[in-house]
Image (cartoon, grey):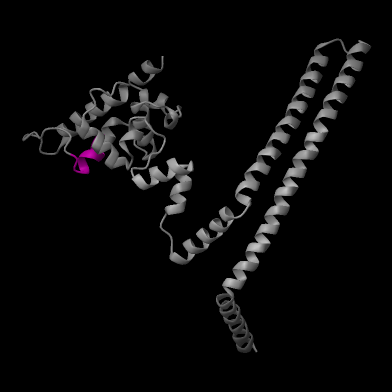
Amino acid sequence: MLKKMYLSAGWSMGFQHLDNGNIEKFNCRLWYLMKKKSIETAKELAHNLYNAGYALVDKNEEDFDGEIAVNNIARRIQEHLNSEDIQKLQSRFIMAYCDFFGCSADYLLGRTLIESNNPDTKHFCEITGLSEKATKRLIEELPDDIKANLMGFWSNMLDSNMFYMLPLEHHKMCYELGQYYAAQNKIDEINKASREMSNSDAFVSIWRTMMEENYLKEAKPHAGAYYLHMNNILNNMSEYLETFAKKYVKSNQSVIDDYFFNKLHEKVGKNHSDI
């Protein structure tokens, strides 16, 4: 059924509703990359590749405006989008796709979730377990002073016990919240079941009250534990941030002083001119 959907003339419209980034198929990855660049058809991608100078088909001397070449490229691209078989996939097209979309061949062929063709990014993702987006944030180009402040903060965070405490405490908090929701959902089921019974039956009322009280007793401790873990996170974060702030001030006192007195002089100068 899925294959018929994108083999049809309107394949692109139906395919847009799929989460192609998580489908480990070459044609799905190719469509996903096209969608990220707002390219909707094989013909449109063919024009882009041809205009970028990729030699994907043999040159025809009668093809003065390149339309024959574009049509031939588009036909090959459509074949790639319509088939899950990569055995007949030409290497020149793989290289062109990877270069044009800025992805690795492994990503294009569905062998990894890491899209970047930067080997350092891929290696960093693999050894740290961080997402590609998180890795790019760490290595993205920023002004030196901004990058120093950002990396200094996160370096201190990773050096501290917060590296272990925060995710573990957060996990406990989420687990308690999940158990609280489980009890509340059971109460909702009990109320729904009781409404389907005879409301005139005294047993129904007693049963519902008894069951609600039992699950409420189970839910309340988990709600309390959830807020306890949240409070522990807030307290520990506050203590850490305060300690880090004092260290930061101590190591950057001269810069902070200059900033303070410059601002003070500006304020005094403005007040003097107003007078």
Q: Pick the quarter of the image with the N terminus.
A: top left
Displayed quadrant of residue 177: top right
Q: Position of residue 179 (x, y in %)?
A: 73, 30
155 lies left or right of 172: left
Q: Pick the quarter of the image with the C terminus.
A: bottom right
Q: Is residue 47 magenta?
A: yes
176 lies left or right of 101: right
The answer to which of 184 and 231 lies nearer the viewer is: 231
Q: Which residues are magenta?
A: 46-54
173 lies left or right of 74: right
> Quick one: which residue is furthest to the right in this view?
202
Count numbered badges in the picture.
Answer: 0
**Residue at image coords 46%, 51%:** 137
**Residue at image coords 87%, 18%:** 208
Q: Is residue 61 above or below residue 120?
A: above
The answer to which of 25 and 139 lies nearer the viewer is: 139
**Residue 200 visible (yes or no):** no
**Residue at image coords 56%, 53%:** 158
Q: Is residue 37 above or below residue 214?
A: below
The answer to which of 89 and 57 lies nearer the viewer is: 89
Q: Is residue 202 magenta?
A: no
Q: Position of residue 234 (x, y in %)?
A: 71, 51
Q: Position of residue 104 (x, y in %)?
A: 32, 38
**Residue 68 visible (yes or no):** yes
262 lies left or right of 189: left
Q: Position of residue 103 (x, y in %)?
A: 33, 40
